[in-house]
Image (cartoon, rainbow, N blue to C red):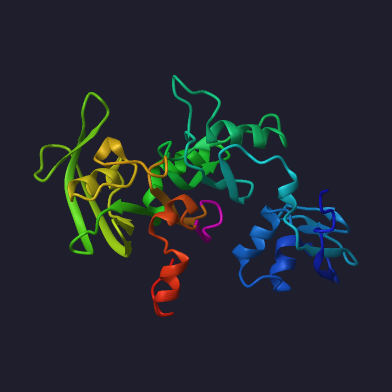
Amino acid sequence: MRNTTRDKVLQEIKVDQPTQLLDFLVQKEVRKSRNAVKSLLAHKQIKVNGKLITQFDFELKAKDKVSVMKYDQSRKEKRLKGLKIVFEDDDLLVIEKEAGFLSVATDKEKSRTVYNSLNEYVKKKDKKARVYVLHRLDREVSGLMIFAKDMELQDIFQKNWDNLVPKYSYMAIVEGRPNPKNGTVTSWLTENKNFVMMSSLIDNGGLKSVTHYKTQKSKGGYSLLDFDLETRRKNQVRVHMQQIGHPIVGDKKYGASNNPIKRIALHAGGLILKHPRTGELLEFKAGIPKAMQILISETQKERKDKPEKEESI
C-alpha cells in the first residue's frame, strides 16, 4: 500500500505585501542560499494557497499562503529514462545521466537517449518546446550534463563554454595505484579511422591535452582519482589514464583488463555554471555512484579493525 502521508508542510508563511515568489522565499530565508531556494522550486516543493508552483517570478498577493513541502513532489511524476533532473529554469536543464544511456541518438540507437527523454519531458508542458545539446557523455559514463531550452543559448554556450562553465570535473576508479599519487599528464591527441583517440608525447599536429589528477583513495587493486582538466578533448581522461598505465576500470577500449561493474568507472561529478541570462554562479555536485564506490569500499570487518580517523568516501 502506498504511503499517502509523505506530503507534509515543513513551513507555512503568510505574504504581507505583493512580491515575486523567488524574492519572497529568499527574503524569508527558507533555505541558506538562493540556489537552494531555486532547487525547492525546481523539485516542486513549493505551494501557494495549496497549489504547486515552480515559476520563479510567480506574482504573490497580500494574504497568500506559501508552503514549503517536505516531500519532493516531482517523485509523483513518471521517472525519466536514464536521468535525474538536478536543476531546471526557463533557460536550462542540468541533469545527472545514468551509465548505459546515450547522450544523443546514433544510427543504431534512436530512442534510448537522454536527449529523447528530455524532449518528451519538456513537450508535456509545451508541445513546441525542445532541448538543445551543449555537450555529451559517453554511453557507459555517468554524471552531470547541461541542456539549453533554446537555440540562442546553445550558440552562446558553444562560443563561450570556458567562461560559462569554469569547472567541469570528473572522478574515476582506475586499475592499480598511480605513482606519483598526484600528477599531470600532457600529450597530443589524434583520432584514427576506427574513432580511437591516439596519444603522442611529442607534438605531432594533434590537439594538445592536459589532465591533472589527484589520488583520493586506494583500496586493493583500485584507486579513486579526481581530475582537473586544463583542456577538454574527446576521451581525454580515458586516454591519459591508459598512457600512465592505470586505465579506468571497465574501459576495455583504452586498456582496462576487466569490467567488474559492467560500465566504465568514470563519473562527471562536479559542475560550476555561470548562468548566461542572470550571470549567477550555480554549483552542482553528483556523488560517486554505488557501482563505483563498491570497488574501493571496505568490508564491515575491515572498518572495525581500523581507527575512526581512517579516510572514507
Q: Residue at x 24, y 43 (%)?
A: 239
**Residue 26 placement (x, y as % from top left):** 69, 69
**Residue 89 placement (x, y as % from top left):** 63, 49
Nearer to me, 100 or 103: 100
Quadrant of res 296: bottom left
Residue segment shown in magenta: 276-286
**Please, is residue 289 above or below residue 139 in the view?**
below
Left or right: 207, with 146 as reference point = left
**Residue 67 placement (x, y as % from top left):** 81, 64
How many numbered callouts? 0
Q: Residue at x 25, y 53 (%)?
A: 211
On-image quarter of the C terminus: bottom left
Task: Farthest residue to the front: give it.
Answer: 301
Residue 164 at least partly seen: no
**Please, is residue 57 above or below residue 135 in the view?**
below
Quadrant of res 306: bottom left
**Please, is residue 132 above or below residue 208 in the view?**
above
Q: Residue at x 67, y 70 (%)?
A: 31
Q: Is residue 145 magenta?
A: no
**Please, is residue 201 above or below residue 120 in the view?**
below
Q: Is residue 281 magenta?
A: yes
Residue 30 at least partly seen: yes
Q: Residue at x 29, y 44 (%)?
A: 238
